[in-house]
C-alpha cells in the first residue's frame, strides 16, 4: 500500500476511534444526568411526602424540571407553584409547556415584599440549590412561614463548606442554614448530609397551628 494511502487510512481509523469515544462519553454523561435526575426526583418526593392532591412550592425553579416532576407526582388534583429564577422565565414556561402538565402555576413576580406564593397554599416547599443566592433570607423565610400550611414541610438542598461547588461561589454552610431556618420559627425534622452528589438536604416542619387546633398534614 502506498505510504500516503496508508497514512490516510491510519488517520481515518484514529479519527473514527476518537469520535466513537466522544459519543460514548456523551451518552454516558447523558445517562448519568438523566439517572441522577430521576433518582433525586424520587428522593425529593419521598422527603416532602408528595402524594396525589398535594400542593407544593418550587422556589426559583430554574429550568422547571423539578416542578414538572413534582406536578406529575401530585397529579391533576394537586398543584405546583413555581417561582422564576435563576433561569429566565421563558425557559421555565417552555419546560412546563413541553411537558404538557396543566397543574403548574408559574409566578414571575409580586410587588414589594409580598409572598410570591399564595398564603397558606402548600403542604410542602422545595428550595433546591438557590437558598444561598438570597440576599435577604430572613424575608424569604418569613414569606415561607406564610405559604406553608400547618405541619407542612420545607426542604432546603444546597452545598456545604469544603465542596467544589462551595469553593466556586455556590452553597452555604449546613450549620448556618439550620440556625437561620430554626430562628425563623421552623422545626428541624431531618438532616441528610449525603443527599446527592456533594449536596446536603435539610428538612424542616411548619409548627402546628395550635390557635386553630390544626394537626400536621397527613403523610402516607
Image (cartoon, rainbow, N blue to C red):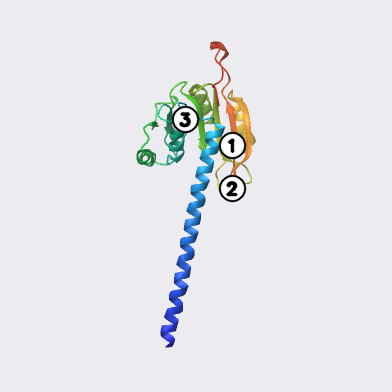
Secondary structure type for disc 1: strand
Residue in the foreground of this view, choosing between 112 and 45: 45
Residue in the foreground of this view, choosing between 214 and 128: 214
- Residue 80 lies, in percent from the top left, at 43, 30
Crowd rating for badge 1 (residues with CA inside 10 Å; few <14, some 14–19, many 20+) = many
Q: CA distance from mark 2 to mark 1?
A: 18 Å
Residue underneath mark 2: 167
- Above or below residue 110? Residue 34 is below
Residue in the foreground of this view, choosing between 75 and 97: 75
Residue underneath mark 3: 57
* Count of number-bearing discs: 3
Secondary structure type for disc 2: helix
Residue underneath mark 1: 201
Dots 2, 1 in contact, CB < 8 A:
no
- Residue 202 lies, in percent from the top left, at 60, 34
Q: Is residue 7 left or right of residue 137?
A: left
Dots 3, 2 in contact, CB < 8 A:
no
**Label 3 or label 2, whichever comes before in sequence order:** 3
Can you name the residue that lies furthest to the bottom here? 2
Residue at 53 percent of width and 11 percent of height: 212
Q: Is residue 175 left or right of residue 6?
A: right
Amino acid at each position: 500500500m502506498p505510504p500516503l494511502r496508508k497514512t490516510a487510512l491510519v488517520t481515518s481509523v484514529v479519527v473514527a476511534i476518537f469520535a466513537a469515544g466522544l459519543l460514548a462519553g456523551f451518552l454516558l454523561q447523558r445517562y448519568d444526568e438523566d439517572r441522577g435526575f430521576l433518582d433525586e426526583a424520587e428522593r425529593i418526593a419521598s422527603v416532602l411526602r408528595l402524594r396525589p392532591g398535594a400542593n407544593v412550592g418550587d422556589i426559583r425553579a430554574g429550568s422547571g424540571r423539578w416542578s414538572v416532576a413534582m406536578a406529575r407526582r401530585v397529579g391533576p388534583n394537586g398543584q405546583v407553584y413555581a417561582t422564576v429564577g435563576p433561569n429566565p422565565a421563558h425557559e421555565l414556561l417552555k419546560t412546563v409547556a413541553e411537558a404538557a402538565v396543566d397543574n403548574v402555576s408559574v409566578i414571575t413576580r409580586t410587588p414589594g415584599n409580598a409572598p410570591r406564593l399564595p398564603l397558606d397554599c402548600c403542604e410542602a416547599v422545595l428550595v433546591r440549590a438557590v437558598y444561598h443566592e438570597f440576599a435577604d433570607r430572613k424575608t424569604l423565610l418569613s414569606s415561607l412561614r406564610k405559604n406553608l400550611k400547618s405541619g407542612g414541610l420545607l426542604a432546603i438542598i444546597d452545598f456545604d463548606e469544603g465542596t467544589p461547588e462551595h469553593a466556586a461561589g455556590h452553597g452555604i454552610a449546613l450549620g448556618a442554614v439550620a440556625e437561620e431556618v430554626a430562628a425563623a420559627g421552623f422545626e428541624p425534622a431531618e438532616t441528610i448530609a449525603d443527599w446527592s452528589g456533594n449536596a446536603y438536604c435539610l428538612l424542616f416542619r411548619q409548627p402546628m397551628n395550635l390557635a386553630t387546633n390544626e394537626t400536621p398534614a397527613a403523610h402516607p
